[in-house]
Amino acid sequence: MDKKLPPGQFETEKWPILHVGDIYQFNEQTWDFQLFGDVKDMVTLTYKEFMQLPKTVQTVNMHCVTTWSKFGTTFEGIALRDLVKLVELEEDVKYVQIYGYYEGDRFGYSANLPLEALQGEDSLFVYRWKDDHHDWQDLDPKHGFPVRFIPPESFYLWKGTKWASGIRFMKEDEAGFWEEMGYSMTANPFKEERYR
Ligand SMILES: Nc1nc2c(c(=O)[nH]1)N[C@H]1C(S)=C(S)[C@@H](COP(=O)(O)O)O[C@H]1N2
Ligand SMILES: [Mo]
């Protein structure tokens, strides 16, 4: 795994915590994961169904727009491309909105991303991690338990929705939570695309 610091970033060994609103308290009874939007039939997965999907392990770098970068965290999770296989996309679907909890609203947080860039093993809905200083462990609630998205490192980490609740498939790009407030739609750290 390459260790390249994007412009304006500094390296941290710690894993900082960054979010707005409350930490979501997981409840298996009410939790589900929805695949919806421009699909033939929408799909809802229970926690058990979600956790039975094929697993992917991948080491990734994370770049937060507040200028910290953490290299070399290994995650276990479910690849976004394996979730996409569960739905039949309408023609011309090119973007996704990845939703997560914010202040009790399961769709209160969101981040938009181009689907084409999310086909690799570095686009993961994760629940376990380790790094050079930590053995395998469950994701802490403050980092997004039971499951949070980690985007490829060609996107700032605000695109990594914590407490993830679903994916909406879209034909046109639409701004998510931070994008509405002026952050970049494309958000490439190596091009320093912080704002729009
Ligand atoms: N649901 C939700 N997900 C979120 C956020 C948030 O406020 N709410 N903040 C984002 C931002 S700005 C960053 S940098 C990362 C931070 O993840 P971490 O706290 O695990 O380091 O989560 C992202 N995902
Ligand atoms: Mo961030």
Image (spheres, rainbow, N blue to C red):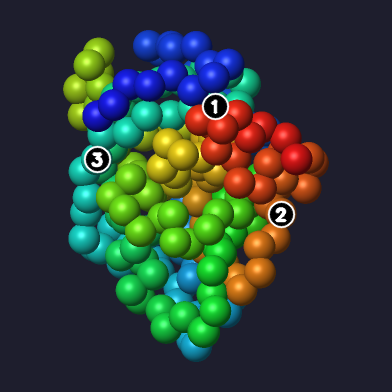
Amino acid type of disc 1? Answer: Cys
Q: Is residue 135 left or right of residue 73?
A: left
Locate residue 134 relative to residue 116 in the image: left or right.
left
Residue in view at x 56 percent, y 32 percent = 191
Question: Mark 2: which secondary structure?
Answer: loop
Position of the C terminus by quadrant: top right
Under mark 3, the amino acid is Gln
> CB of mark 1 within 8 Å of CB of mark 2?
no
The answer to whether 189 is drawn above or below residue 29 in the figure is: above
> Is label 1's Cβ within 8 Å of ligand 1?
yes
Amino acid on which disc 2 is placed: Ala
Cα gap from disc 1 to disc 3, whole angstroms: 19 Å
The mark that comes first in sequence, 1 or 3, is 3
The residue at 55%/38% (across/down) is 188
Point out which mark residue 51 bears.
none
**Camera-side residue of 12 and 194:** 194
Could you say which disc has been placed on residue 64 in the image?
1
Q: CA distance from mark 3 to mark 2?
A: 28 Å
Q: Earlier in the sequence, mark 1 or mark 2?
A: 1
Q: Are marks 3 and 2 in contact (CB under 8 Å)?
A: no
Q: Give the residue pinned by disc 2.
A: 175
The residue carrying mark 3 is: 58
Left or right: where 41 falls relative to 1: right
Query: How many angstroms separate mark 1 from mark 2 (CA)?
Result: 18 Å
